[in-house]
């Protein structure tokens, strides 16, 4: 069994949230992601709150969080990809590749 150490009380909320998420403690993860929204980890926090909403079976809330995640940077791109996965029209237009 893989075990993760408890995060330090000095760890950033996003670090504590990621540890809680991996451990399956979704309520604690959500609390810490909400705290992380106030800092530099806002895109990560919004992305993960969207993931937690999907886990809870609430796609409407997940979409709202993904839209809040930003449109730039790695977490913004991940949020955009998740929004695309939820949109039936997103993959309808395939980009033209060389040789098509």
Image: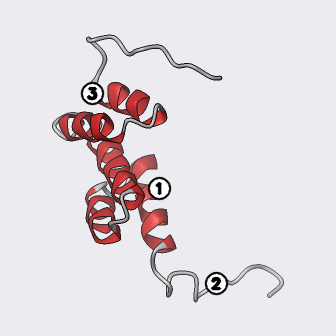
Of badges 2 and 3, nearer the viewer stands 3
Residue where numbered disc 1 is placed: 78
Between 19 and 89, the one nearer to me in the picture = 19
Q: Residue at x 37, y 15 (%)?
A: 7
| Rendering quarter of residue 99 | bottom right
Q: Please name whichever residue, 43 or 63, is drawn nearer the observer in this view of the structure.
A: 63
Local packing at callout 1 (Cα closer than 10 Å; few below 14, some 14-19, many 20+) is some
Mark 2 and mark 3 residues within 8 Å of each other at the beta carbon? no
- 91 or 29: which is nearer to us? 29
First along the sequence among labels 1 and 3: 3
Q: Give me the disc on residue 17.
A: none
Decide which of tag 2 and tag 1 comes sooner along the chain.
1
Q: How many marks overall?
A: 3
Mark 3, other Cα within 10 Å: few <14 / some 14–19 / many ≥20: many
Which residue does the image show at 50% across and 85% down from the upper left?
Answer: 88
* C-alpha separation, residue under disc 2 versus residue under disc 1: 19 Å
**Vertical side of 43 occupied by 88: above or below:** below
Q: Which mark is residue 94?
A: 2
Q: Is residue 95 left or right of residue 85?
A: right
Q: Is residue 45 above or below residue 64?
A: above
Q: Report the Cα–Cα distance between label 1 and label 3.
A: 20 Å
Q: Residue at x 41, y 49 (%)?
A: 75
The picture quadrant where one finds residue 76 is bottom left
Q: Which residue is mark 3?
A: 13
- Residue 96 x %, y %: 69, 84
Mark 2 or mark 3: whose residue is earlier in sequence: 3
Whole-percent x and y of residue 1? 65, 23
- Where is 6 relative to 96, above or below? above
């Amino acid at each position: 069994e893989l075990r993760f150490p408890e995060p330090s009380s000095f760890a950033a909320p996003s670090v504590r949230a990621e540890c809680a998420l991996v451990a399956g403690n979704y309520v604690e993860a959500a609390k810490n992601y909400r705290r992380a929204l106030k800092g530099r980890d806002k895109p990560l926090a919004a992305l993960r709150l969207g993931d937690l909403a999907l886990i809870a079976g609430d796609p409407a809330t997940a979409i709202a969080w993904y839209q809040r995640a930003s449109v730039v940077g790695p977490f913004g791109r991940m949020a955009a990809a998740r929004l695309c996965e939820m949109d039936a029209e997103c993959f309808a237009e395939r980009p033209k590749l060389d040789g098509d």
